[in-house]
Amino acid sequence: MDLVNNPATNWRESALQSDQEIVKCLADTLGRPVGYGENARGGYDPNGNSRLTVISTSAGVSVEQQLLDAISGDEHNWVVFDKDDFSDDVEIAMYRLQCGNSAVLGKLGATEQQCVDFRQWCSAKGVSAANCDHQFFNVTLDDANLPIRNVVVGSNTTIDGRQAKPIIRFNGFAIGRDSSGMPTQTAESVILTHLSFRGAGHVEDHGLDPDMIRSTGASHDIWIHKNDFFYTGDAAFDVKVGAYYITLSFNRVLDVKRASLHGSSDSRTINEQITTTFHHNLFLTSESFYDEGRSTARRVPLLRRGSSHMFNNVFMNYYKDFASVRVGGTLLFEDNVFLGGTPIQDEKSDLNASFTSWVTDNLSDAVVDDGNFTTTGSFAWFADDDCNINPSFKAQVLGGGGTARNLAQDYSSASSNVIAGQKFAAGQELVDYVNATAGKDGAVPFNSPLTAGKQAILTASLAGCLR
């Protein structure tokens, strides 16, 4: 599979010549989702209508405009990034599409070029490099009246960052649209994979609502897979206004306060149809971010009315209640791991007191306001900062509220069989596998036929989880 493994072979330089052949290769090597999003196919049309779009920095049109044009329709479109042009990090900041807007330029007191390159704006305004992101995005642009919003992804779309280094800056994509709690555009069959999302830090109720991925408008059949999320302004991946059949897998989420709201209002009955599967995601809090993030609910998820099945996820240094179940929601939580590193161990003067407080106060049934939360096989351990478990400190994670039904019964037999064959018990092997595979640059996981396999991945040399 030279096309997907060799950075020297660009997307139209292999023996595969037609768009259909190339996109089929991309779809086959990415593999198939399991769980609620198992029918997401993105830009691949087995009937022969697949189109490949290659984003380039030398096209004469901005990268942002090329990307917007590619994702706005409902035709089958698999979007990749030119391997040569994106061999080094390239920032893609969709707010730049509004840098010709007079309201935006007036708010910034900037030229169009200073808007496009926010570091130029900071230099002209005398803002230090250390404070540049915050001042530009979170102070000056924190205004709901500005036209900057997440761009909308249409149906039958894949955005695939493999073999390239696109960095999605500040805010990202909405899958579908809504207005006042009602769908106004519904997208189906969307895949976002191998992308890096970098925010400018969390600001409560930011006027531009800078989620990285927002599934909304009753959109469905969505796969969010092997992405990196770092320091996002709002959610990593919210689910709103009845979006459903979504799988979130092998993502690496670092220093994100509010990872995944599921339903934004208690009163919206449409959110009863929300269904998500979380598996093999790595949720990390670094020691440098711990003081800022320790007392903030992490929304993994904050679940209203809908249903979420979470298995084989790993959480490092999550001190506050990791999830919240409200208004009759259902959370089935199976074989997940919580690790408490140095900052959690240092919460009290005594390790035993620190462990008891963490487990009792933050991994308890207090997360359930009104709903169903069942846990099986999920445990908390103390660990070192490389995510090596200390077996002397172990406790079972408890559920609360009503009993969650077995959501896995909703899956196809094919999906269920893959899950059964690949699922880990909570423990060090699960931690190592997720650490090795989660995120854009992680090893190829079991979804893909290109995976090296469980044992090869576990025996490879691993970097620390907070690398």
Image: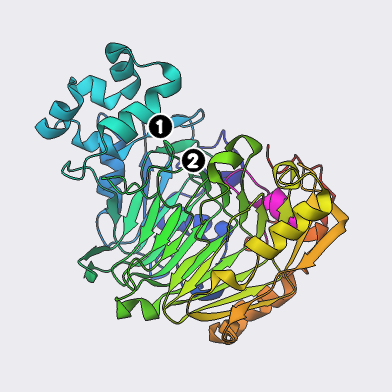
**Does residue 440 belong to the magenta stretch?**
yes
Q: Which residue is mark 1?
A: 91
Relative to the observer, which residue lies in front, 74 or 376?
376
Identified by mark 1, the residue type is Glu
Residue 458 shows in this picture: no
Relative to the observer, which residue lies in front, 315 or 95?
315
Residue 321 position in % (x across, y down): 58, 61
In which image quadrant can residue 411 be found? bottom right
Residue 153 position in % (x across, y down): 31, 56
463 lies left or right of 74: right
Q: Which residue is mark 2?
A: 231
Secondary structure at badge 1 equals strand
Relative to the observer, which residue lies in front, 9 or 182?
182
- Classify 37 as above or below 104: below
Identified by mark 2, the residue type is Tyr
Residue 169 position in % (x across, y down): 39, 37
Q: Residues within 10 Å of mark 2 (few under 14, many from 20)?
A: many
> For the magenta stretch, what is the residue range?
431-445
- Classify 242 as above or below 76: below
